[in-house]
Structure formats: C-alpha cells, structure tokens
Amino acid sequence: MIYFFILFSIALLNDLENYTNPLLNKKGLKIDGNIKGNLIPGLPQEITPQEIELIKSKAKDYLPEPVNEDDIIIMETNYGIMEFILYNNLAPNHAYNFKKLANSGFYDETIFHRIIPGFMAQGGDILTRDSNKENDGRGNPGWTIDQEFNNIPHKKGILSMARSQDVNSAGSQFFICFNDARHLDNKYTVFGSMINGFEVLDKIEKLKSEADYIISKSVDKISDDKSSQFVEFNYKGSKRYIKVPLNENKNKFKIDVNKSLKNIHRTKKPVKITKVRVDNENIEEQSR
C-alpha cells in the first residue's frame, strides 16, 4: 500500500510540474481562479474582475498585422457563423481597433447583450462575462477611438460601432443592423458589412427576450390546481400569472420574474460569441 502511495505521489508531482496555470498573468502573479457562476449550456462561464482586467491588458498590448483588403471577420456564435468585410479605406482606425480586439481574444465568450428585432444586435462588452447582469452594456477595453463617420448607409448586415453621447467614445462595443436604420447615418461609424451568415442574423433577430419569455409562459387566469403556486404581475394594465417551478422559492421567483420583465432587449437564450478573428482570406494561397 505504501509503495502504491509513493508511486501515485510521484505521478501527481510530475503532472503539477508540467501544468501551465492559465490563471497566471505575464508577471507570474496569481489571480482569483475560483470557479463560479452558471453551468447552463450556451451561457459563457462567468469570470472574475481580475480575469477581465487580464484580458483587457492582453488586448492593449496586442499588436496585429495591419488591416489589408483581403481581411475577413469570422464571427462564430452558438447560432452559426457570420462573416464580414472591413471598410479599412473609410474607417481605418475602427477596422484596426476591431482586428486588435478580435485577434487578441477580447471578444471570445462575450454575448450580444442588447437585441432589438427590426433594429440591431449589440455586443462586444467584456462585462457580459462577469456575474453581474446589471453592468452589461457599460464595459470598454480601457481606451477610446475618435469617430470616422462616412457615407455608408446603415442597412441589414452593416457592422457599426456603438458609443455614448460623446461621438469620440467608441471602444469595443459594436452592433449589427437587422434592417435599415438610416437615422444612424453619419452619426455612428460604419466599419464593416456582412457577406455571409444572413440566415444566422435572422435566427438571432427572432429570439425571445427575457420579458417575452415570461409573458409567453403566463396566463390571465389561475387554474383550480391548488397544489401549484403562482406569481402575479401586471402587463399592459392587466393582471397575469405565472406558475412557480417545483422546489423554487416563491419570493425569489417573484424577484426573478420582475427582473426578467425589465429585460426587454436581453434574450432568454443568450447569443454567445464563441470566437471572433480577422483573417486574411488569401493566407492559405500565399503559404503554398
């Protein structure tokens, strides 16, 4: 027994010596690596504020190759792949900034936190990876770029940069148009356009919001089933009821329902950006 214990200990030590800890930054400083958050399929694994800062630091230090006319954005999501060209001649700083963020891995595992059917889907916020839903839409990479407004119209498949009221406040958040949005022309910087994956964009547009999901599961009258509990809420001036799931605390469920009813632009089934890269479509040909 002692002999086998010694062998096991030696093997374990060898494994630890060969293991590269992904939670060490460039200086070898350990960050909080406690696994927490959801394990729901399709949802990104929640990460800590320290890990988010590490991703931002990596993006800041990353220097991609200059953007060229053969570059293609390949955006992989849990609903399919979308591809875009870059308007480097019209918005060179935005095109380069997007390539810098994408190829550093900044966008990987983020979600589209704001989806408005008939309008657009907005993503690119690193804070969608933490445990706090309330801060989604407030994240940035740690820097901003100045506007590069141009004459490309906002229409279906257009890739444009989100910003605050300050026209020079774009950072990492972007949006993809579902339809014509000409009121945004010359007010937001268009820097790309979809060439493949329109069917994926259509799937995303049709997803129900958290609020829509609650409404679809509710009824206007309570059944006679006394074994079930219901939560009451108001919708467009009328009372509606939704059944409390088995083994769920009624008060907690009511809080969750009220939160979901406020999320009219966040989809019940998250649209996760699993990976985004800007690749040269002629790389394979050049390497032959």
Image: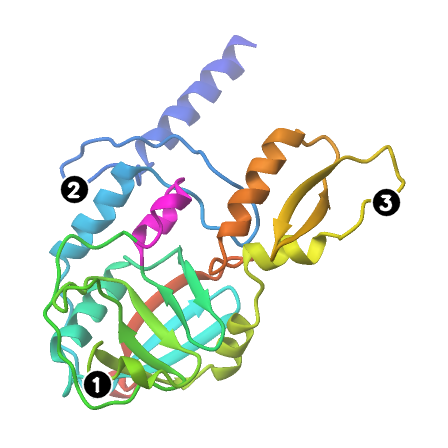
Residue 175 % position (x, y)? 34, 71
Residue 160 % position (x, y)? 28, 76
Query: Which of pointers 3 and 1 lies earlier in the amino acid sequence?
Result: 1
Say the numbered circle drawn on residue 87: 1
Residue highlighted by disc 2: 26
Say the numbered circle drawn on residue 223: 3
**Highlighted magenta segment, given as a residue range:** 125-137
* Residue name at image x 28 percent, y 89 percent: 153
Query: Which of pointers 1 and 2 lies earlier in the amino acid sequence?
Result: 2
Q: CA distance from mark 1 to mark 2?
A: 34 Å
Q: CA distance from mark 2 to mark 3?
A: 60 Å
**Residue type (three-letter) at the residue carrying disc 2:** Lys
- Element carrying mark 2: loop
> Is residue 268 in view?
no
Q: Is residue 188 above or below residue 56?
A: below
**Residue type (three-letter) at the residue carrying disc 1:** Tyr
